[in-house]
Image: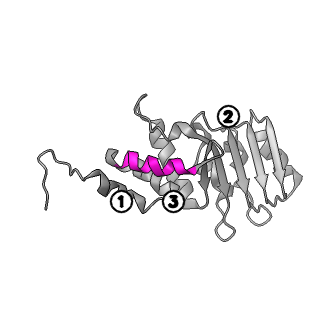
Amino acid sequence: MLRPASGSLHLPHEVLEHIIGFLWDDPSELARCCLVCRAFLFPALYHLKDYECCGRTTLGIQNRAALSGYARWFRLNRNKPFGEQNTYIDIVLAIVVIDDSRRPFAHLFPMILPGCNIPPTVSSLQFHCIDWSLTRPHSRFFDCLAFFTGITKLELTACCLRSAWDLRRTVAALPNLESLMLNNI
């Protein structure tokens, strides 16, 4: 067993890349690796850059665990002193929430991931496959959505809302909204 004198174990860069390489398809876990250890930061960022889409980096959230993980990541990064922030945070420009029909979570999105923790570079919010006819939004959903002040573009795709009132409340909750796209509503 290796016992370094400095108190921390230093692994070769190739070993770190190999470990992080197993997580290439899970951006939320890669984001968590950035928080674990400074040595994991650059290999994880290398794979996170693969999630760049059309010149814009999107953060895809497909389950509640990923939502909670990103919420923790944003919260921890927000509290770091200037200059120590994670560089991946600054290139996130859009958040895509794809709801799970078996275990819906989008109705809790703004409560778990508060808008005050979102970096100012995020300007686009997309909801896909939400079904509010079965799972109603949380009573504080629209109040908490108002804290997403940097969002200027909202896109709803393949969503089932209970009424036009839900759409109106969603649009009215985003204070700086400039663009609204509706697809298969």
Which residue lies under the disc numbered 2? 149
Which residue lies under the disc numbered 3? 26
Q: Nearer the viewer, residue 68 or 10?
A: 10
Give the position of the C terminus as an image quadrant.
Answer: bottom right
Residue type at mark 2: give it. Answer: Thr
Give coordinates of residue 69: x percent, y percent. 50, 54
Vertical side of 160 occupied by 117: above or below: above
| Closer to the eye: label 2 or 3 | 3
Q: Is residue 100 magenta?
A: no
Observer able to see residue 71: no
Instruction: Say few, some or many: other residues with alpha carbon within 10 Å of mark 1 (under 14 / 14 to 19 / 20 or more).
Output: few
Which residue lies under the disc numbered 1? 18
Please report whichever mark, 1 or 3, sits nearer to the chain's N-terminal start: 1
10 displayed left or right of 70? left
Whole-number angstrom distance, CA of label 2 to CA of label 3: 28 Å
The magenta span reads 40-51
Residue found at x 64% / y 68%: 103
175 displayed left or right of 83? right
Residue type at mark 3: give it. Answer: Asp
- Secondary-structure class at tag 3: loop
Residue type at mark 1: give it. Answer: His
- Secondary-structure class at tag 1: helix
Secondary structure mainly formed by the magenta segment: helix
| Closer to the eye: label 1 or 3 | 1
Vertical side of 65 occupied by 102: above or below: below
Give coordinates of residue 110: x percent, y percent. 64, 48
Observer able to see residue 63: yes
